[in-house]
Amino acid sequence: MDMLRSAQIAEADLGEWRKLAQGLHARYLVDGFGAGVRFVAAVGEAGDALHHHPRVSIGAECVDLKLVSHDAIYRDDEGTEHVVEWVTQQDVDLARRITEIAADHGLRADPASVSDLELGLDTARSSRIAPVWAALLTGSAESQGRGTPSDEIRDATGRVPNLWFGDADEQQTTGQRFHVEVYVAPEAAAPRIAAVLAAGGTVVDDSDAPALTVVADQDGNRGVLCVDVAAVKQD
């Protein structure tokens, strides 16, 4: 099934869901762990009917869900097809069904609180060093390039954040190479940046804001706040 571009996801107008990194994310507030389990059981039945399931985390106060297809088709500029992890129509269909189930259970969504974390490592030799990080992070060489046409490290079970490789000069030997990327809902970006500033951090580069805002701590260590603004339906 073809991957959906951000504009197509925006047109789907999913309301309670937010596109972060590769997938769709939602959080529903529950009154206790048991209520969360009952909700997830109903979601599981719906997933069985559609032959597709979300990744789920259950707590005493909320249920977090992530929808992503592991066999989405991406076509590059040359027309070559790649199998990638991304949002497809089956994710959109299941997201709509889960929204209905949440309403049946009397649950309220909290879309502003969803987030996702990825790691970035700048290197000029990703193909050389990726096997080391695949082994360290997941214990499996198959996680290198999994669900992506690049050398990115992705764990099939979601135990660890994705690790992607950015470009760096071959001669670079100093400076920060690792950084975190935090994906948030569009409405959460400004409050999150304000919290960083209130804690003593600084904005290093907001030229691509609100999509990308680079911030730093007092020691100069950088992180990136990310928002998929193209996946937001414009009124």
Image (spheres, grey):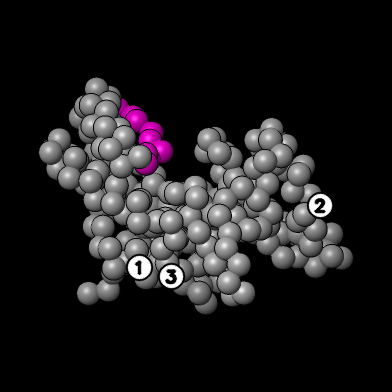
Label 2 Cα crowd, 10 Å radius (few <14 / some 14-19 / many 20+): few
The CA span between labels 3 and 2 is 33 Å
* Number of the front mark, 1 or 3: 1
Q: Position of residue 189 (x, y in %)?
A: 39, 61
Q: Residue at x 28, y 63 (%)?
A: 12
Q: What residue span does the magenta drawing correspond to? A: 52-62
Give the residue at mark 1.
8
Residue type at the position of mark 2: Arg
With 27 as the anchor, is 175 left or right in this view? Answer: right
Give the label, 3 or 2, closer to the camera: 2
The residue that mark 3 highlights is 210
Query: Which marked residue is nearer to the observer: mark 1 or mark 2?
Result: 1
| Quadrant occupied by the N terminus | bottom left
Marks 1 and 2 sit apart, C-alpha to C-alpha, by 36 Å
Front one among 163 and 220: 163
Residue 168 seen in render:
yes
Q: What x and y, as percent, mark residue 152?
A: 65, 52
State the image coordinates of residue 168 (x, y, percent, origin top left).
75, 65
Query: Which label's residue is closer to the chain start, 1 or 2?
Result: 1
Circle 1: residue type: Gln
Q: Quadrant of the C terminus?
A: bottom left
**Residue, x 68% and y 46% (percent of image)?**
144
Name the quadrant containing residue 75.
bottom right
Q: Can see residue 194?
A: no
47 vs 228, nearest the viewer = 47
Question: Residue most toward the top?
Answer: 34
Secondary structure under the numbered disc 1 in the rendered image = helix
Query: Residue 128 — which label?
Result: 2
Mark 3, secondary structure of its residue: loop
Of the two numbered discs 1 and 3 on the same chain, state the one appearing first in sequence: 1
When the figure is inspected, residue 173 is found, relative to residue 119, above or below; the finding is below
